[in-house]
Amino acid sequence: MSPKKAADAEKDDEELDYEEFEGNEEDAPAEVGGEDSSVSGIEVTDLPGVGPAIGKRLAESGYKNVEAIAVASPNELAAAGSIGETTATKIIKAAREMLDIGFETADLFLERRKHAGRISTGSKALDELFGGGLETQSITEMYGSFRSGKTQMGHQLAVMIQRPPEDGGLSANAIFVDTEGTFRPERLVDMAEAYGMDTAKVLKNVVWARAYNSDHQILLCDQAMQMSNELNAKLLVLDSVTSHFRAEYTGRGTLAARQQKLNKHLHHLQRGAEINNMAVYITNQVMSRPDAFFGDPTAPVGGHVLAHVPQTRCYLRKSKGERRICRLVDSPNLPEGEAVFTVMKEGIRDV
Ligand SMILES: Nc1ncnc2c1ncn2[C@@H]1O[C@H](COP(=O)(O)OP(=O)(O)OP(=O)(O)O)[C@@H](O)[C@H]1O
Ligand SMILES: [Mg+2]
């Protein structure tokens, strides 16, 4: 985690109410290790203060390895392990020290970045705009008006990720969190058939859940991150990130609460993307800006919170006929630019 992000995470914690949990110590053996065991070889129970009982509870809450604990926030870990927050802070600190997390030299960071995978979008022009496709270890946000193709792109990515690297995928699976009820397995079939893929297999490799409110959405995304190893999922589609927040928090007075919750949600997604080497694709609606006299009178929902967390932000708009224009608005390492594509029965394609 970069020092800035670490500082942000700390800030998140300060803003939240702490609750102390004093659970009973059960003497059950820890079920740690296996598929979710640490990349570093350090077991959770190697951490000072983590015995079998706490280790078990942490594992059950998804903290199955030292890496996950190192990037947790104290209040989350306290809740997960039924331990005091001071203990949680000490455990996190120990995990960070053991893993040598903190500053790292740029060459090591570059090394980690080399493991970042790319997922093709189905359109060459779009892939080029994204520097070779959607990147893992980061969040890509697509915002745009209704029917601009945001959901179609989510479906397309869920199919593309399953293809081998030479065909634009990562030979991995996808998790789809649907907040608007617009996920359509039939579209996956259409898109998979276009590439001659085994459609039954393609459908099996996408797990889907409908999120009914913002709390449910957050829960499902956290669960998605925890399941990703087991499922070999390298893509999380969240369609859309803001609709529930927008519907539930109306009025000026609730704005701060909404932004705080959204901010935490996005930081969780970001952390999950980094730990699990996953691509997180989120969609977002646009709202009209009545004050805009010049230029495009639309802006993405979510305000400054959404403007700062996703690494890559794109604006999708409809053009003549079935054409869509994707504009790369913000990226840490790619130039701004535009690409034109279309949505067909077969999926996302070049014009
Ligand atoms: N089977 C299909 N064949 C051809 N085009 C399709 C097909 N299904 C969907 N589309 C295209 O995709 C468009 C819908 O795009 P999509 O649902 O991705 O929009 P969106 O940006 O998610 O909109 P919203 O903001 O309403 O969620 C349709 O208007 C149509 O042009
Ligand atoms: Mg949609």
Image (cartoon, rainbow, N blue to C red):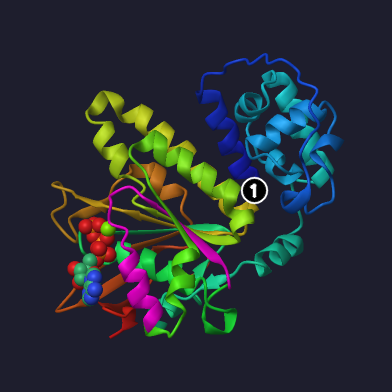
Quadrant in which the C terminus appears: bottom left
> At 28% from the left edge and 49% from the top edge, which residue is drawn?
180
Above or below — where is 214 with respect to 124? above
Ligand 2 quadrant in view: bottom left
| Percent coordinates x, y for residue 233 in the rendering | 56, 60
On whether residue 48 falls in the magenta region, the answer is no
Q: From the viewer's perspective, is 126 left or right of 318?
A: right
Which quarter of the picture shows residue 252? Answer: top left
Viewer-nearest residue: 239 or 298: 239
Residue 113 appears in the rendering: yes
Q: From the viewer's perspective, is 5 left or right of 153?
A: right
On whether residue 174 falls in the magenta region, the answer is yes
| Percent coordinates x, y for residue 324 in the rendering | 25, 74
> At 82% from the left edge and 25% from the top edge, which residue is drawn?
49
Give the magenta-colored segment's residue range: 171-193
| Residue at the disc numbered 1 | 2
Above or below — where is 225 with respect to 128? above
> At 42% from the left edge and 84% from the top edge, which residue is drawn?
195
Residue 332 appears in the rendering: no
Q: From the viewer's perspective, is 261 left or right of 299?
A: right
Above or below — where is 212 with respect to 159? above
| Percent coordinates x, y for residue 163 in the rendering | 52, 77
Q: Secondary structure at mark 1?
A: loop
Which quarter of the picture shows residue 325? Answer: bottom left
